[in-house]
Image (cartoon, rainbow, N blue to C red):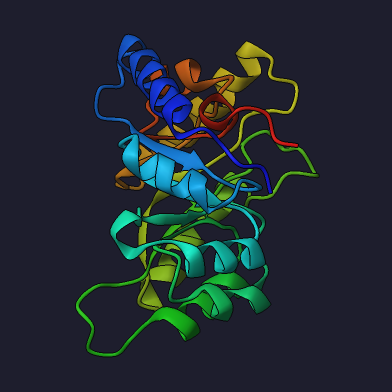
Amino acid sequence: MTSIDASQVALRASEIRQRINAAGGKDVKLIAVTKTFDVGAMVAAFDAGCDGVGENYAQELITKSNELPIAKRLPVHFIGRLQSNKIKLMAEIVDVWQSVDRVELINEIAKRCVKPGAGDRPQIMLQVNATDEPDKGGCKPHEVSDLIETANAKGLEVLGLMTVGPTSNEAQSTQRSFRLVRKLVDDLGLKQCSMGMTGDLEIAIAEGSTMIRVGSALFGPRR
């Protein structure tokens, strides 16, 4: 895994916050995408004041969680393609499951994470494929309402929606897809809207993102 320079991360986090504020997103959460970096990235994200860390791979997350000091732990968001057979391995680690896009995953998260009598419900976000690209994860926009109903019935808390901008990075297409997802969030009375990464965070914030996911702008290029 790639190691990082904590002082550089702190500087870059400050620069990203400036970009966020300049785009009008004063209260937007910054999720540091720490995939492929060692556990030092999680520590650096904590020290830099990030709001959470985002991971994509089950085994990598488990390994780093075992090495991470509890005092340096940020909320963990799972943002990668989610396989149902991996959920039980991460059930005690993940705080927010951001890439839920089908009933099978809702059922498995409910099975592994709902604890009878517990006051807090497991938190998920539904990933929406707003660009209609077949290689992208996410449910179709018209499927969101039924998935929310299923998740609520299973004892999960749907915080909001998540999406990834178009592969083309074309500004108008990005704006259109983000606007569609934000409208769904509003129409369905949800609170969180996770959209925007290093290259398109300004567009995302302008369209109403409440949470951006940034990796390379914090930690440098992945090797």
Q: Which quadrant of the structure image shows residue 194?
A: top left
Residue 69 appears anywhere in the view: yes
Q: Say whether residue 172 is left or right of residue 53.
A: right
Q: Which residue is drawn at 42% across and 66% down?
A: 149
Mark yes or no: residue 51 visible.
no
Front residue of 193/61: it is 61
The answer to whether residue 115 is above or below residue 183 is below
Residue 139, image x and y in percent?
A: 62, 52
Single out the residue that lies furthest toward the left. 119
Q: Residue at image x 50%, y 44%?
A: 41
Q: Quadrant of the C terminus?
A: top right
Residue depicted at x 70% and y 35%: 222
Looking at this rendering, what residue extends furthest in the bottom direction? Answer: 116
The answer to whether 19 appears left or right of 21 in the picture is: right
| Rendered image quadrant of residue 125 | bottom left
Residue 91: x and y in percent read 48, 76
Query: How many dots with numbers?
Result: 0
Q: Nearer the viewer, residue 108 or 61?
A: 61
Identity of the residue drawn at 35% across and 21% down: 14
Whether 105 is drawn above or below 25: the answer is below
Extreme residue in the right direction? 135
Residue 53 percent coordinates (x, y): 45, 48
Instruction: Identify which residue, 177 or 38, lies in the foreground.
Output: 38
Q: Is residue 195 left or right of residue 138?
A: left
Q: In this rendered view, identify the residue nearer to me: 99 or 22.
A: 22
- Where is residue 218? Give x, y as percent: 51, 29
**Drawn side of residue 196 relative to residue 140, left or right:** left
Q: In this view, does 201 lie above or below 80?
A: above
